[in-house]
Image: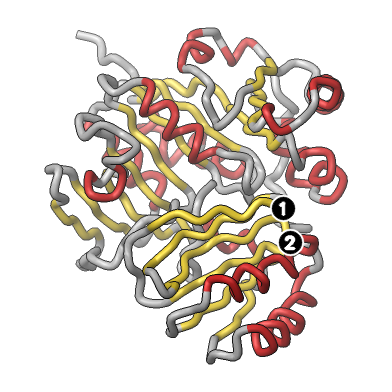
Amino acid sequence: MLETLIPLYCLTGFVGSGKTTALLSILRQNPDKKIGVIFTEPPLLHRQNIQENEDISIEMLDNGSLQCSCSEDALAQALAYMHRCQPEMVFVEVSGLSDPVHVKKILESEENADLMQHYAVQGIICLIDADNFMEQIQDVEMVGRQLCHCHLAVINKADLVAPELLGMLKAQIHRINPDCDIVSCSYGGFSLELLEHDLLSHPTSEEEDADTGSMPDSIVLNCDHRLPRDKVVAFIERFIPETYRIKGFCLFENGWSQVDVVGSRIHFAPCMPHSSSRLIFISKIGHALSKPLAESWEELIGLPMQLHDEPDACRFLRLCSICFTFLLPHLYNAVFPQSIRFAGFFIFGQNTHLTGG
């Protein structure tokens, strides 16, 4: 009896384009499907109860699902685990700062040939931030590379732009990738029905080496003290023009909150406790942002903190991973029915806890 291959999709897009939101939308629309998700950087979720073993750690969650972490060969381990779980399909969410060619080469490598015989790669989907794309495509080479290598471009946040600009975005995307399909949506709400078409019928750019240069730098701020929310907002607002994205989690007077800044919009949402407050600034001006960050923090907040640079944002892709079932009932029961189940892996750099998006 022939094995039924597991459809595999890669989801790319620059930071803040809405990749994780799109995946959550797919899950919410398809509560009866068993969908696997592999992240190359983790969404803002609580991880303090992960127990480390020699190679892989596993924790049973309240809903009977598994949470585990791996140290090496993370993508291959994640795919092997997914195969054992037998999902109906798998999505690999590629870090917003990475080149999709890198992941594609891993999937096509000879050493993973035996593993990949269980999968049918269906194509690359690229999320576009309608509100910020025109600036990003001029400033960040990776945005263009992500588009060049996609089979389907999804213009997200279409509700934030005028119809005229939406038309300009589609024209620009076609100039970069004349062969890909283009659809638009809001809140990441594209349907699985779009994936019923043969995405691989659209050719992408010829193979080339993955790009590891000219990447935005990330600066990480940690603080062990309870923070005044109004002053943190004022602090963040100062650096919106000089960053592509700001994200993290903070302990405010009324408890823990997730922080997510894309463009000029600051979003807060309750989150699980963490060991300390952390904000990650994806800088437009490189490490030059560090000094004004430190000076403004001292001026506005004045509490002790630690600030360190990530020399190269590509380091987020070094293979260290966490695999877990994403929809913890106590965390997401306000958004999703508890009947939703899927297995998910996080693959991210050893020196950061940057979140997905």
Measured as percent of width and height from the top left, residue 143 is found at 74, 42
Measured as percent of width and height from the top left, residue 62 is found at 13, 49
Q: Mark 1 points at which residue?
A: 264
Q: What residue type is labelled 1?
A: Ser
* Apparent side of residue 12 relative to residue 195 in the rendered image (left or right): right
Q: Mark 2 points at which residue?
A: 240
Q: Residue placed at 55% from the left, 41% from the top?
A: 103
Quadrant of residue 47 in the image? bottom left
Q: Residue placed at 19% from the left, 47% from the top?
A: 66
Q: Which amino acid does label 2 sit on?
A: Ile
Q: In this view, does 102 lie above or below 214?
A: above
Q: Is residue 176 above or below residue 80?
A: above
- Label 2 neighbourhood size at 10 Å, few (<14), some (14-19), many (20+)? many
Q: Nearer the viewer, residue 92 or 104?
A: 92
Badge 1 marks a residue whose secondary structure is: loop
Q: Residue placed at 76% from the left, 30% from the top?
A: 161
Q: Is residue 192 above or below residue 27?
A: above
Q: Is residue 83 visible?
A: no
Q: Is residue 325 above or below residue 312?
A: above
Measured as percent of width and height from the top left, residue 248 is found at 51, 63
Q: Residue placed at 54% from the left, 90% from the top?
A: 303
Quadrant of residue 204 in the image? top right
Q: Which of marks 2 and 1 is nearer the N terminus?
A: 2
**What is the spatial separation of the Cα atoms under label 2 and label 1, in whole angstroms?**
6 Å
Q: Is residue 182 visible?
A: yes
Badge 2 marks a residue whose secondary structure is: helix
Q: Label 1 near label 2: C-beta < 8 Å?
A: yes
Chosen colour scheme:
secondary structure
